[in-house]
Amino acid sequence: MVSRYHRDEQYELLPRTSDDSDDSTDGTGRSHYRPRTNDIKLSTWVTRIARLAFRNTRSLYTKVYRQRGSRGLLSRSSYWLLIALMSFTTLSIIFTAAFRPSYSRPPDHYQILRRKCEESKEIGRGNVKNEKIFIAASLHDPEGTLVGGDWGSAVADLVDLLGPQNVHLSVYENDASSQAKAALEHMKNKLQCNSSLLSEHLPAGDIPRVITPLGESKMKRIAFLAEVRNRALRPLEAKEVVKFDKLLFINDVVFDPIDAVNLLFSTNHQPSGYTQYQAACAVDFINAFKFYDRFALRDFEGFTSGIPFYPWFTDAGQATSRRDVLAQKDAVRVRACWGGMVAFEAKWFQNTSPGGTTQDSLSESTDGDFKVSSLRFRHEEDPFWEASECCLIHADLTYLRHGGNTTNVSGIFMNPYIRVAYDRQTLRWLPYTRRVERLYPWIHSILDHIVGMPQYNPRRQENPGEEVVEKVWQYDNAAGKPGNHPQGSYREKKRTAAPGRFCGIRRLMVMKQNPKQGEKNWENVPLPSVS
């Protein structure tokens, strides 16, 4: 069974469908998940491009040269210009794919680790230093095809590469169906590592709500996503839990387990043999060319990303992130990212000193004294201001690590060598489509300027602890009733900025109470105009 995960422009927790395919298993019940490098030869791929470019040249030539006079001369000139352009484009594609491929030649230590994983069957072969890894996931898998398919197989093989004795796997599902529960139970029986595979009903009363302009009380979508992610982290709160070295959060993506190992142990690799990062993200794709998770991604200066294809970032400001991508770095400096799979230093999630969690403290502080201990996901509380919980977690991490000094440091990296997808076919194409990416930057820049990227964020330059004046929506009455259209307005409010102001945009997303079958389970609420 090949699962195809259809999704909106945001990310996780959306309904799924699946199609049948004869090549989904190898006869043993295990799904293939690795991109098969011999499926499509590069020479065949280049030949197809050449055939496409020149297929109709002969008939076009005959048609043009039958014309007479000045019109014929103009047509012949246009014809040769078109031929020259097509030839130049084709040769550029061939040359780039063959001699200047993008993100196709990783540093040596990536290749050494991959060979070690591929050439041996030893358990734990990918975890040379036996680091302790906590793997977390919050899933929406109504038919059980995710846990019982590509995702579950990849996670099981990842545990084998890391060593079951080094891993704790935590999976959380809200309102799982009987099929999903059966898939979780089957996975738990196969695993040899410590695990916490939990399915439960999340009470609606546990999620903060917001009043819409129609007077309706709705559950904030980001608040819901933050809560289910935090529930996947609950095993870290046990009294006698192991001290982990790294935490790996995995979305509902199709991925190569060896890529996950390289994300953990190769990103920003140091001569000491250890990595140096607070967080390292993969890059996720919704199709063979289109990057997906723009909502959580911010460049090194806090700007939103550009058009969702390579090099992803705009040339705004110093363009640090864009320049790192163009330099083919494996550790692209950013302020926040997610990309379907992200590795963290685990110590920020396991600090047991007094002070509560970021979920409790950072978004609610008014005096700038953000005393926190354990990092957790959170949401923005303003009614018409949204920020991805996956962006805020990085902002909070940077604050805990560096305090208010967020200008020149982050320790957060995006790794374009590590790519994941939302269906198997896309993952198989990524090794080939990435090869020609170096042809895109000039097109990307032009389109960014045409469509007005990056998006404007009036709070981007606010730093934690600063006194700021912000426009905040407030209703005239404290509460409304459905249908009464409560009145309100944006009002200037003086307050102390919490971390993550660069993550936000003016928007409101709420959960639907009873979505129809096939519909997404959330919606955008129209914004009141900002004068």
Image (cartoon, rainbow, N blue to C red):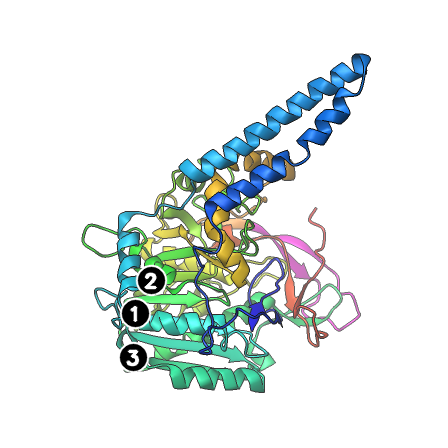
What residue is rendered at 40% in x and 86% in y? 189
Q: Nearer the viewer, residue 293 or 70?
A: 70
Please, is residue 208 above or below residue 460 in the view?
A: below
Direction top: furthest residue: 69
What residue is rendered at 70% in x and 69% in y? 519
* Magenta run includes residue 475: yes
**Mark 2 element type:** helix
For residue 162, the mark is 1
For badge 2, the amino acid type reads Val
Q: Nearer the viewer, residue 174 or 531?
A: 174
Please, is residue 82 above or below residue 158 in the view?
A: above
Q: Is residue 276 visible?
A: no
For badge 3, the amino acid type reads Val
What residue is rendered at 43% in x and 73% in y? 153
**Mark 1 element type:** helix
Residue where numbered disc 2 is placed? 261
Q: Nearer the viewer, residue 334 or 17?
A: 17
Highlighted range, magenta: 470-491
What residue is rendered at 70% in x and 67% in y? 477
Q: Are marks 1 and 2 in contact (CB under 8 Å)?
A: yes
Residue where numbered disc 3 is placed? 241
Query: Split into 4 quadrants, where in the image is the N terminus?
Result: bottom right
N-terminal-most mark, 1 or 2: 1
The percent position of residue 200, horizontal first and vertical second, equals 52, 84
For badge 1, the amino acid type reads Leu
- Decide: few, some or many residues near mark 1? Use Cα within 10 Å; few <14, some 14-19, many ≥20: many
